[in-house]
Amino acid sequence: AKEDGRNTHRFFETDMGIAVNDRRELISDLRNAVANGEMELYFQPQYSLDNYAISGFEALVRWNHPTRGLVSPGDFIPLAEDTGLITQLGQWVLTEACRIAAGWPRHLRMAVNLSPRQLRGHAFGPVLIEALAKSGLRADRLELEVTESVLLTDSDEVLDALHQAKSLGVKVSMDDFGTGYSSLSYLRRFPFDKIKIDQSFVRSMAYSDDSISIVKAVIELAKNLDMTTTAEGVETRQLLDMLKDIGCNEAQGYFLGRPMPVAQAEELIFACEQS
Ligand code: C2E
Ligand code: CA
Ligand code: CA
Ligand code: CA
């Protein structure tokens, strides 16, 4: 789980079933994996609640480890962050996601997750510009998803990088909204285009009126700030209907579609185009 990622001890012993002293081996594996193309992108569809059409996809990275099998990002992203490998990995994800999206119908957007560390230093701007230029993807079809931890660093570099992205026309979303310590103050510090309401709030709407009130308030707040909302972790029809009723713009979750390899995403896109 992502939340456990910082605690590498727990993360290695429980999530991967291997000892902490394998860490070094895993790091070298990861370094090779990034260089040798063992990383793969999966894509999860996002649906507009106006018409239930697909509005875009979120790119989610997977590691196809030769002996360990498919490793989930919660298990290796923290490692990549700790070791600095995230810079190279993040660049690959961004470039690959832009390349793939450029071949898809023009109304579809592509959302890419960014780690705080990718935005530090002054390398991100040029990487972004190159990914857009090389792929030919229109900037407004790209969305960068950042969590509150990105703004936690309080560094001008990070804010500059995000402002630069916006000035290029790229969209910026606040991911996992509501899970941090001061979500509201972050909304004031950066003009996000979109708020992604965290799965924990969405899921608890099924049994908690208070949760419904909170999600309603977030949607209202977003509207007043000229931001759109996407609900994450929509696992049932009931939740989907509730979210539409209270004015959420988009939804994403297992009920609508799981993250899938590129070929399957393209079949889905094609099937939707036909109908
Ligand atoms: P996230 O950005 O919040 O992504 C959503 C996660 O929730 C994904 O897990 C997705 O598979 C999962 N999910 C989607 N719908 C549902 C649902 O209905 N129910 C449940 N239970 N889960 C759902 P995944 O792919 O394992 O990714 C975990 C986290 O790893 C992501 O959380 C993101 O923070 C990070 N991550 C993934 N890809 C990248 C990447 O390319 N770069 C960076 N920096 N981080 C990434
Ligand atoms: Ca995300
Ligand atoms: Ca999220
Ligand atoms: Ca999350």
Image: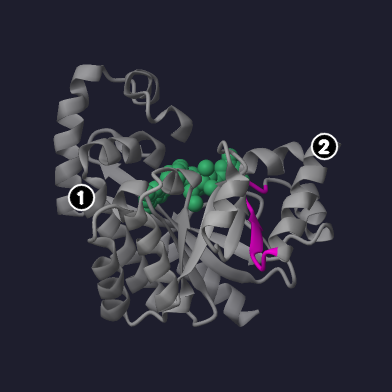
Q: Residues under labels 2 and 1: Cα distance?
A: 44 Å
The vertical placement of 274 against 68, above or below, is below
Res. 161 image quadrant? bottom left
Horizontal arrangement in the rendering, residue 220 relative to residue 54 (left or right): right
Mark 2 touches mark 1? (CB < 8 Å):
no
Q: Is residue 195 magenta?
A: no
- Amino acid, disc 1: Val
**Relative depth, front residue between 1 and 116:** 116
Does the rendering let one see residue 237? no
Identify the residue at image location x=19%, y=46%. Answer: 33
Tag 1: Cα neighbours inside 10 Å, few (<14), some, or many (≥20)? Answer: some
- What secondary structure is marked by label 1? helix
The vertical placement of 145 against 19, above or below, is below
Does the rendering let one see residue 60? yes
Residue 210: give its label: 2
**Relative depth, front residue between 129 and 51:** 129
Mark whose residue sits in front, 2 or 1: 2
**Dot 2 or dot 1, earlier in sequence:** 1
Identify the residue at image location x=82%, y=52%. Answer: 242
Question: Where are the magenta residues, as a range?
Answer: 225-234
Horizontal arrangement in the rendering, residue 144 relative to residue 79 (left or right): right
How far across and how far down the image is residue 2, in percent?
45, 35
Residue 34: give its label: 1
- Amino acid, disc 2: Asp
Ligand 1 within 8 Å of the CB at mark 2:
no
How far across and how far down the image is residue 68, in percent?
28, 33
The vertical placement of 209 against 255, above or below, is above
